[in-house]
Image (cartoon, helix red, strand yellow):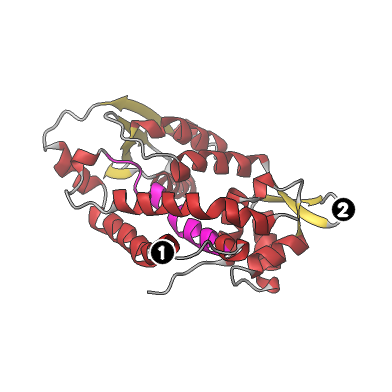
Amino acid sequence: MVEQHTPRSLIVTFYGAYGRAFPGPVPVSALVRLLGAAGVDAPSVRSSVSRLKRRGFLLPARAEDGAAGYELSEEARQLLEDGDGRIYGAPRRSREWLLAVFSVPEQERAKRHLLRSRLARLGFGAVAPGVWIAPAHLHGETRRTLDRLHLTPYVELFRGAHLGFAPTAEAVARWWDLAALAKQHEEFLDLHEPALRALQQGPAPTAEAAYRGYLLALDTWRRLPYADPGLPRDLLPADWPGDRAAAVFTELHTRLRDIGARFVEP
């Protein structure tokens, strides 16, 4: 299996992993060097940065030495901070559910599409048209996302228990595509568990190798805690691969992140 990493995704991953600790805005020259180490050529870095600027994720700014650079917008910082808890924290397992019920007028159907896509990105499962569900611990992040996108007038949020009529495990299997989620975890393991075994059995990597390995592993991993939002373990199949995938990423994070930071230093 060949791992796919887009330049834009790798830039977002870089800012999440290392860019926020950079002393001031990250110079364009540093982005070219650091993304080059992950296999991205300079024209792709520059074009991807321009797209992220148009989206409001990055803002042009002068680095400490006066060189052209980019810093995160406040919205981007909030997105990354929301992601920290999911990506780096232990999986949370709520016993309650968060229900999002929405109705969007036909003349504003673009907002309906935006609402559905953002709920899906947050990890919600679809119960029925206009009714989506997620573990209750996603409440705060969901509110911030809907408020940021000016979608709160169309949505009501409820918190509570599932009372039937089908067993909750059967309902969860309808609300989420568990087979597809398991496959994503298994693909992560196929790609990164061998790398972890090599680290466990071999010498410590160089700073550049640690940086590259960590950036690529994180770029793959950071999508999984959104696709799999922390469903209660007893509602998942007995052979669920998510726990093992999380353990592999956690050890890669522990072994590689700080060593890789030496390569990032200006």
- Image height check: is 216 above or below 82? below
Q: Earlier in the sequence, mark 1 or mark 2?
A: 2
Report the side of 193 relative to 114 (left or right): left
Image quarter of the N terminus: bottom left
| Residue at 47% across, 60% down | 217
Residue 136: give its label.
Answer: none
Considering depth in this image, is 235 or 140 the residue closer to the camera?
235
Secondary element at image label 1:
helix
Q: Residue at x 11, y 38 (%)?
A: 166
Residue 195 visible in this rendered orientation of the protein: yes
Q: Amino acid at mark 2?
A: Asp
Answer left or right for 199 relative to 260.
Answer: left
The region drawn magenta spans 212-231
> In this orientation, which residue lies closer to the viewer: 245 or 107?
245
Mark 2: secondary structure: loop
Residue 10 found in image quarter: bottom right
| Badge 1 density bin: few <14, some 14–19, many ≥20, Cα 10 Å | few
Look at the image and tell me whether residue 56 can be seen. Answer: no
Q: CA separation, marks 1 and 2?
A: 42 Å
Residue highlighted by disc 1: 201
**258 horizontally vs 232: left or right:** right
| Magenta span includes 141 | no
Residue at the spot of label 2: 65
State the quadrant of the C terminus: bottom right
Q: Nearer the viewer, residue 22 or 7?
A: 22
